Image (cartoon, helix red, strand yellow):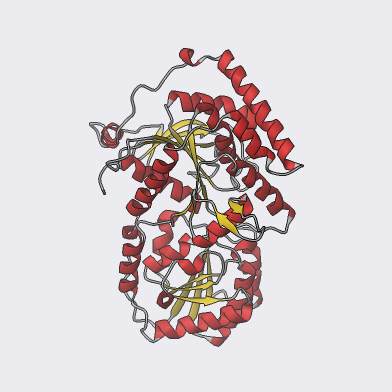
Amino acid sequence: MRNGTSATMAPLSIAMITDFFYPNVGGVENHVYMLSANLIKRGHKVIVITHSHAPDRVGIRWLVPSLKVYYIPFVPIASSATLPNFLTFLPYLRTILIREHIHLIHAHASLSALGHEGILHSHFFGIRTVFTDHSLFGFDDAASILTNKLLAATLRHVDGVICVSHTGRENTVLRGELYDVAEDGETWTIRNHVYVIPNALIPQHFQPGPQSNSDTVTIVVLSRLAYRKGIDLLVAVAPRICKAFPEVRFLIGGDGPKRIDLLQMREKYQLQDRIEMLGPVKHTEARSVLIRGTIFLNTSLTESFGIAILEAACAGLYAVSTRVGGVPEILPEEMISFAEPEEDDVFRAIGEAISIVKGGKHDPILAHNRIRDFYDWEDVTERTEVVYDNVIKLPHTDIWQRIQRTMGLGPFAGPIYTIILIVNCMFFLFLEWWLPRDQMDFVTEDWDPKKFADFVMGEDEHTQVGSTESIP
């Protein structure tokens, strides 16, 4: 069904919880907003719980189409992520969940402390939980080890897990210990509550631009300029490409710690007329940058999905990417050239792409039409509803079951997380006594999308609503 919720599923009240949300822009932020907007269109009530992103962005804001956002007054420490709050977050969360009559919590991103805590606290309210993992992580450095153990502790209490690619699913299953080992000690199976639902986009926002008769080949890079995005590879290969192919120009958008390396490379090889640095690019301006190009280049060292590649292909660009993570699952092989994450192979793949686009073997309009048919937010939303329907039907787990699951983390981590769980439970009981539910104000009415739109516009189309914002 395309309109309204499925015939077998009643409308739900859903709380999206994540550290990563607007006004910051990124793949997770866009995913949470688009999924929320489409769930609202299908008849569900959705709110977002995140932290403050600026001194003046605290409290409640509304986004089109009637998406209510709670900005909790917690300050991020790095990359929009907060430190674990535990007992300080629970009073806020308890008030919101009770007032909004929430049925299900959907947490996003492994590095979101709010998401982990939302899952930890949720079972006190009898609320079902879903977690979406958007990234890949390693296993051999201190940061990854700590993150993975935290993820494993959280996923002991989650009812459903969604990954954006099959590679991401394998990574999350190993990191979160979401598998059962057979008696022989060698055979293991993934638990059946781990799902794969890819990302999506709005094809209308990435229409191909007019075709140019110029012989110039423009390679576009839109990325966070950081080590994980393989900017060192770009720094190494760009001068070689410019020397070997005089018709090539680079268009680089984004910001990050590796920006200075790109600027130094451009200065060293005197490529100011061949490499244009755009700086930060808003998501609403991405298409205008993409349609200036012919080839899109991604040099990531790790990538769970790669929404930027999908957007570029939808805008009609031929893609070149390192063969990492879930990237090989995104596009048909005739729309992308792959390279190993090493300088010589990236050079080879770019040369292959240049010959393909100059030879007229890539049709931007056909590429756009194929992406439009492959990736659709309505389809993603329907598949997510199936996950919600499955977890809502699960029986509730009591505190003793949760303690047993937590102790299974191991002789060291198990007792530590169990103590946290017990202290958390005691603090929850204290809050129930300190502020009884029958003394709380409840939200008795919510805006439907049409009512919200009428309120925003008002009788005068120039009416300003200070606490209401629109995300394109």
x then y, percent, for residue 465:
36, 32
The front one of 249 and 165 is 165
As displayed, is residue 303 above or below residue 49? below
Left or right of 257: which side holds 52? left
- Extreme-left residue of the structure: 459
Left or right of 384: which side holds 338? right
x then y, percent, for residue 284:
41, 54
The front one of 305 and 231 is 305
Residue 288 placement: quadrant: bottom left
As displayed, is residue 122 above or below residue 436? below
**Count of numbered labels shown in the rendering:** 0
x then y, percent, for residue 23:
48, 44
- Extreme-right residue of the structure: 412
Tell me which residue sits at (61%, 60%) in the image: 187
Tell me which residue sits at (25%, 45%) in the image: 3
Is residue 290 shown to the viewer in this render? yes
The front one of 381 and 462 is 381
x then y, percent, for residue 274:
53, 76
Left or right of 81: which side holds 309? left
